[in-house]
Each structure stands twice: as structure tokens, then as C-alpha cells.
Amino acid sequence: MPLRDAIRRARVLVVGDVMLDRYWFGDVSRISPEAPVPVVHVTRNEDRIGGAGNVARNAAALGAQVTLLSVAGRDEAGQALRSLLDAETFTVHLHEDPAFSTITKLRIIGRQQQLLRVDFETQPGHEVLAAKLEAYAQLLADCDVVILSDYGKGGLTHVTRMIELARAANKPILVDPKGDDWARYTGATLITPNRSEFREVAGSWKSEAELADKAAAVRASFHLDALLVTRSEEGMSLFDAEGAHHEATRAQEVFDVSGAGDTVIAAFAVALAAGGSGVEAVRLANRAAGIVVGKFGTAVATADEVFGEEA
């Protein structure tokens, strides 16, 4: 069966920090008399689904059956996020924490350039995280692959237990990591750091051979089946039991790299869930990422865009 058709049967569970990406667009024509900063006359605004929600959108855009599990607050941003999620085709389990401020990233854009980002966030409470972990255990049975999308906002406090449960259920677990404490990701099937994130954990390298050695050491240290390092203009490299596989970058023009990591892990996961090999999965992820970085803001690569390139 062609990979595109097999993906339609793939069931993906996405868990992690979902957030609201807000954009205020405007014109910049002068500098403020109060401080040496531009004055932005806001002319329009746009809300998008970000974080783990963008991972879910990318997996669904490729045709997979997707379930999203996360936390939001009982605030205006949470209401806006729910409205956006209601319009999506995937299943959403959004646990509500009244004391939690829905994670929001406000970007102010002038002349197609990001001038400022303002973040709003708090940590979710123990009770809502416990309820989410219980829901996760129940949802595992109905998925083919698990994506844990960690933005370091507290939504994956129980990530070690989540990996244990998925392993016990014989489900592949893909993790988009945050920070340099990878011990909590021990036992994951695949981790997808970018170049700088991998360097934080493994140290720098001067050659491809040294990079491969460091990848092997990290895989052994954290009992990972594979490691996918995204390397910006250098493409991406998959390290697994069969060795190293490198894919050169496919982006024709880079407009915005925000959310590209979401696209990579989503595309890799749907290919894996569809029965594809690691090499097939990284090729799909590379094609999808090359499309998304040519778009503005958090965006998706559709099945038509990705598989159309093969026609």
C-alpha cells in the first residue's frame, strides 16, 4: 500500500503543551518619542493553534487520525484556543485548570518582521495533571504511535511515567525534547532535538564521524531506539541501530522556521504509524519541513503538498 494511503489508517496520540499563538500585524512608520523603539500601528490580528496543538494539526494535515491531549485555562485565551480546536478534524481532550493561564505567545509583526514576542504562562496544577495522566493511560490502547511534545511549560511533568506506560503497551514513543535533562526521556523510541538542543546534551563535534559517535553514546545512555537531529541548513540526520542516514535540506526559500520542529516530529510519527521504515519517515519529515519553513508562522504541510512532490 502506498505510504499516503497507509497514513489515513494511522492513529496518532499527541500529548504536551498546547498553546495559543497570537499575531498582531501593523505598520511601522516612526520611532517612539518615549524610547528608541518602533511604534506599531496594529491593523489586524490572527490567532493560531501552537505547541502540541500544532503538532496535532500537522499530523492531521497529512491524513492521519489524531487525538490531542493537553491542558488549558478557564480564561479568554483558553476560550479562543478551544474555538480554534473545535474547527479542526482531530479529536481533542483538553483538561481545564481554572487557576492555569493558557499558554499564549503574542508576536507583534511589522513589515513582515517579528518585532517582539510576549509570553503568558503559568504551571498547571497537580490535580489536572493527574487527571491528564489517567486519560493518557486510557487513550493509549487506541493509538499506533505516541508523540510527547515538550515545551517545558509543565504539561509533561509525568513524561517518565508516560513513556513507561507506552512501552508497556508496546507503542512507539516520539519525544520533541526541551532542556538538557534527557534522563526523563529514558526509554523513548525516538527523540528529535535540533542541532543546538543536541549540542547542549552531547557537546560540540567537528566531523560527521564525531557526530555519529556522540549520537550513539546518547542513544546508549538513554536507551533510545533512534535519534533524529534536525540541523537547519544542513538538513537532518537519523541515527539508529542500522547506522546514520542523512537527508539534505529541501527548503527552496526559508521564510519562518517557527513550528518546523512540530512538523518534523508529526510527519515522522505518521510515517512510522503507517508502517514506514525510519528512512521513509525521515524523508517524509524532511519534505514536510521544507514546505513549512516557506510559510509564515505556525503552519502545516498538507498531504497534497508533500506527496505532490513525488508525482
Image: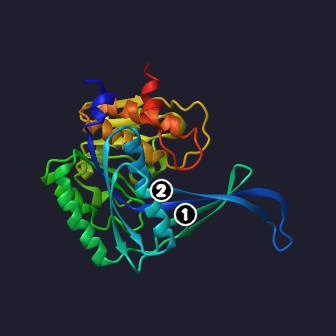
**Residue count near mark 2 (Cα–Cα under 10 Å), binned few <14, some 14–19, many ≥20:** many
Say what secondary structure mark 1 lies in.
Answer: strand
- Residue 194 at x, y percent in the picture: 45, 47
Going by the numbered disc 2, the residue's amino acid type is: Gly
In the displayed structure image, the side of residue 19 where residue 25 appears, left or right: right
Q: Is residue 203 visible?
A: no
33 relative to 217, above or below: below
277 relative to 203, above or below: above
304 relative to 58, above or below: above
Which quadrant: the N terminus?
A: top left
Residue occupying the far top of the picture: 311
**Residue count near mark 1 (Cα–Cα under 10 Å), binned few <14, some 14–19, many ≥20:** some
Going by the numbered disc 1, the residue's amino acid type is: Lys
Say what secondary structure mark 2 lies in.
Answer: strand
Q: What distance separates the C-alpha of mark 2 from that of mark 1? A: 9 Å
In the displayed structure image, the side of residue 39 where residue 174 appears, left or right: left
277 or 108: nearer the viewer = 108
Which quadrant: the C terminus?
A: top left
Using the rendered view, name the quadrant where residue 227 is placed. Answer: top left
**Mark 2 touches mark 1? (CB < 8 Å):** yes
- Residue 257 at x, y percent in the picture: 55, 45
- Residue 71 at x, y percent in the picture: 36, 67
Q: Earlier in the sequence, mark 2 or mark 1?
A: 2
User: Which residue matches tag 2?
Assistant: 50
Q: Is residue 92 visible?
A: yes
Residue occupying the far left of the picture: 168
User: Which residue matches tag 1?
Assistant: 105
Residue occupying the far bottom of the picture: 99
- Residue 57 at x, y percent in the picture: 42, 48
Residue at left 22%, top 49%?
223
Residue at left 18%, top 60%?
138
256 or 206: nearer the viewer = 256
